[in-house]
Amino acid sequence: MHIRHILPQSAMGYLPDDPGSAALTGISNVAWSLAQQQLAAGHCVELVAPGGGRGLRTAVVDGVTLRWLPEAAWLRNARFDFSYLLPLQIFGMVAGITDIAHVHSNPFFLRTTRAAAHVLHYHNSPPGGSPRYTSAVHRAHTVICCSCFIREQFLDRVLFPAERVRVVYNGADIDQFSIVDRTAARVAYGIERDRVVLLYVGRIGYEKGLHVLLDALERVIATCDKPPLLLVAGSGRLGFEGYRPAWADLQSYEAQVRHQASQLPVMFLGNVSRSSLPKLYRAADLFVCPSVYEEPFGMVNIEAAAAGLPVVGSCIGGIPEAIIPEGNGLLVAPADVAALATALAQLIHNPELRRTYARESVRLAAHYSWNALADEVLGLYNAALKPVSRPIIAG
């Protein structure tokens, strides 16, 4: 089977030259992880991504064909942005037909690729509303949503057959997290053995709630003989290098939180490569997801679970689908500094409770391996192909 993943434009579809080891956005991480599993199952896979102002580039990385399309900046204005759509259409005319066009997030890109079946994958809530948008979505044989929350949002906003809308959660490379020695990981980051370490991984943007976590940390420190250390992995820059207006706002917020953290035990690590994430997670004792917006799912929570970490997260959006309250972690109201501080203190001061939650995290993560999730996606591909072709068996 030939599978063509089409990533969205701007920061969401940012694809580095070496996705296997570099820092990735959430959507690119999903596409790359599925591509790796699909390649291992014997399929031919390519990823098509926006390439900014650079010319057409093609590379084969770990067996997957990567294509970066130049964006036409002159087709971008305040009302419309066709800077990536036109290059995609031109590419689609010359690239030839594929078995599966797996389009991420943007239904208007479905018409750019000739395929036996089209799959639309939502990683965020759709805008919906207009007849033009609904018409674009109906080019998809199947719609995949990254959580039940996103599926509900989609069906509320877009008129589409519910039986063709499926949930496939985001996952983690379970084995990569379990093989890292925790003691060695802490040594690598220069962390004392008896210090409690909190971890935040994600974009540094207001919606992710890092400012709330810092306020909560300040309260928690007052209750501790030895203050916990917070590791912050991420930045506002990832994927936004070619989109300066958006990056300017993110840069301002990042400067604010860095100033807020200047008197707190916080270590900013910047963007951490995908290959280094398992070591980072294993160096921590507790993961925090303090989002203040309707997070679609929160793949970082599954990565943390795979590393055997208890998780504290905001009870909003799809986050509750990745955290079992008093099972593998705790849920708190978004932007509630007092509630977050209480939850953190509960786990910081109770190592046995952390260990209990950690064991449940490992059991939970076993259901979110990319291998199993890729099999689910393959089943949806085969179902989408049935009206026009016989099913294709994995491998």
Image (spheres, rainbow, N blue to C red):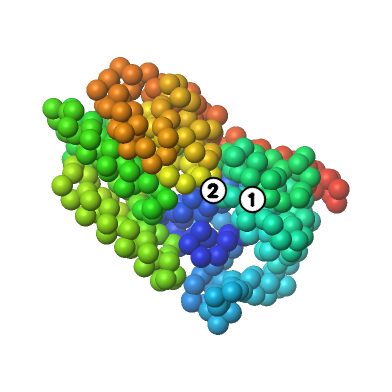
Label 1 crowd bin: few (<14), some (14–19), many (20+), radius 10 Å = many
Badge 1 amino acid: His
Name the disc covering residue 30, or none: 2
Question: Which of the two residues, 40 or 290, is positioned nearer the viewer here?
Answer: 290
Residue 114 location (% of width, % of height) = 75, 64
Q: Are marks 2 and 1 in contact (CB under 8 Å)?
A: yes
Q: Which residue is mark 1?
A: 121
Badge 2 amino acid: Val
In the rendered view, would you say 133 is above or below 354?
Answer: below
As measured in the structure, the alpha-carbon distance from the residue carrying label 2 to the one carrying label 1 is 10 Å
Q: Residue placed at 28% from the left, 38% from the top?
A: 216
Residue 90 location (% of width, % of height) = 68, 75
In the rendered view, would you say 340 is above or below 127?
Answer: above
Residue 381 showing in the rendered view: no
Which type of secondary structure does the marked residue at label 2 adopt?
Answer: helix
Mark 2 or 1 closer to N-term?
2
Name the disc covering residue 369, or none: none
Left or right: 211, with 365 as reference point: left
Q: Residue placed at 80% from the left, 48% from the top?
A: 385
Q: Residue placed at 42% from the left, 44% from the top?
A: 291
Residue 269 location (% of width, % of height) = 27, 50
Left or right: 117, with 106 as reference point: right
Quadrant of the image occupied by residue 82: bottom right
Which type of secondary structure does the marked residue at label 1 adopt?
Answer: strand
Q: Residue placed at 51% from the left, 70% from the top?
A: 51
Residue 160 location (% of width, % of height) = 77, 48
Residue 122 showing in the rendered view: yes
Question: Which of the two residues, 295 or 70, is positioned nearer the viewer here?
Answer: 295
Left or right: 116, with 21 as reference point: right
Q: Pick out the residue farthest to the left.
A: 225
Question: Which of the two residues, 166 or 346, is positioned nearer the viewer here?
Answer: 346
Q: Pick out the residue farthest to the bottom.
A: 74
